[in-house]
Image (cartoon, grey):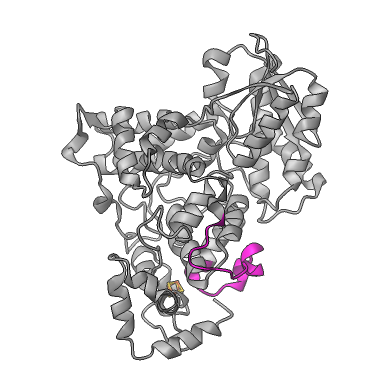
Amino acid sequence: MTAVRDDTPLWLFADQLGPAVHGGEHAHREVLLVEAQHALRKRRYHRQKLHLVLSALRHADRDLGDRATLMIADTYTAALEQFGRPVLVHQPTSFAAEKFVHRLKERGLVADVLPTPTFALPRDEFEQWAGNRTRFRMEDFYRDQRRRFDVLMDGAEPVGHRWNFDEENREPPPRMQRTLRVPAPYQPREDDIDEQVRRDLDRMDLDTVGVDGPRLFAVTPTEAQRALKRFIEHRMPTFGRYEDAIMAEDWAMSHSLFSVPLNLGVLHPLDAVHAAEQAYRNHRAPLAAVEGFIRQILGWREYMWHLYWHFGEDYVDNNELSAHTPLPDWWKDLDADAVTAECLRHALMGVRDRGWTHHIQRLMVLGNHALQRGYDPRRLTEWFATAYVDGFRWVMPTNVVGMSQHADGGMLATKPYAAGGAYINKMSDHCGSCVYDPRKRLGENACPFTAGYWAFVHRHQSRLARNNRTRRVVQNMERLGDLEDVIAQEKSRTRF
Ligand code: SF4
């Protein structure tokens, strides 16, 4: 093994940039950054995702000044060989990258592998927590995270004597408004680096999806702190109440848009969590909103990260519902204009135009559609990981295979997240302007979500009947007099 010395440089992947590595024990270490052309070409990424990654790397290079070397090479290996000295590196964020780094270590190009700096809970602590569990409940993990990091706690008790404020955080959108009428999210000011990135991406002529557009997300620690400040001061109070609602004319609503800076590593989760808690303690945000936000960052995001590793590399191959439909071209190409269903069209437009939609559009519109239509979960995972600007490889398997598609048979979620048009009608303002009718399951204007829901229940009735949480929907389905016609209609449906 190559010896680690005080002057051993630190190689940073593009999703590990940020204060956690610029400061602390590595504050004075030389830093290596690599733009690997092969990695940019390997998959069909959203154009804006490539922009964010390159912009983040180049801004890190500028911010670190003389300490940093930014190398542009065909592959990471070629860059390291050319660099000529062994480097330290943080444990990367995917199985494939982890194996790759270990091969580099065997060749002496990497001196040692340090822990990942961009999550709150270390991996060994999660493994102790997981123990021999076979069923995993986010709520248990989340409560232990609150205790472990002493967040929203009064001694041993949760602040407000409740762990969970989901009930207050599920309101439909306000009916007489077209937007939430909250101050806009922080938007970074593009600079010469962004201009150069845009020119370089044009020149590289990569096979991408989505359209180019202004940079909407923070990619540096400084930008991330500004985004955090604006969110906490102006948007946090309305975050919780409407976090599950969808508004056609308000793509960001009160969402934080932190998934990109968090997943690039330029915002540490505990910084966001502590700022939110402080807002509550200073009486500047209601407890339900703060709890809902902290639940997403310290609970769900950390949970997804650890389960990615705990469930193993083959987890993404789970396909318990035998879903083998290939993703249609209009879906893969983000061709929103080919879609009639308003909710689906808007969600796809959001991915096309920004590479981002909020979690309910992911789960209850796009994921729900894919579940009803039996899209192949592995291909769907790949799609979410490449078409979304925050979709790094660790984040999608558990979110898509487990939560959204129930393809793991219930390791992660106790029931499939399938829903008809009634749910979307309640939680969005889309249905009023849609040619389909959320109450209709049969006929020309039958809602594809309502009809698709019953076709899904019919297809999986034996499994759903064995589950206490879904047994009743099978009984409801058996009472439908037109079920056979609905199923025949959905089998032949080619447009949505
Ligand atoms: Fe979506 Fe159905 Fe509502 Fe149209 S009617 S917006 S397809 S849920």
**Percent coordinates x, y for residue 55 in the rendering:** 66, 35
The image quadrant that residue 125 belongs to is top left
Asked if residue 338 lies in the magenta stretch, the reply is yes
Q: Residue at 30%, 55% (x, y): give it.
A: 170
Specify start and end residues of the magenta stretch as a single range.
317-344
**Is residue 304 shown left or right of residue 101?**
left
| Quadrant location, ligand no. 1 | bottom left
**Percent coordinates x, y for residue 149 in the rendering:** 33, 28
**Percent coordinates x, y for residue 276 in the rendering:** 34, 33
In the current view of this chain or complex, which residue is farthest to the top?
6
Our reading of the magenta stretch's main secondary structure is loop
- Which sits in the foreground, 40 or 63? 40
Q: Residue at 38%, 39% (x, y): give it.
A: 130
**Is residue 244 shown left or right of residue 396?**
left
Q: Is residue 474 above or below residue 17?
A: below
- Which sits in the foreground, 259 or 413? 413
Which image quadrant: the C terminus? bottom right
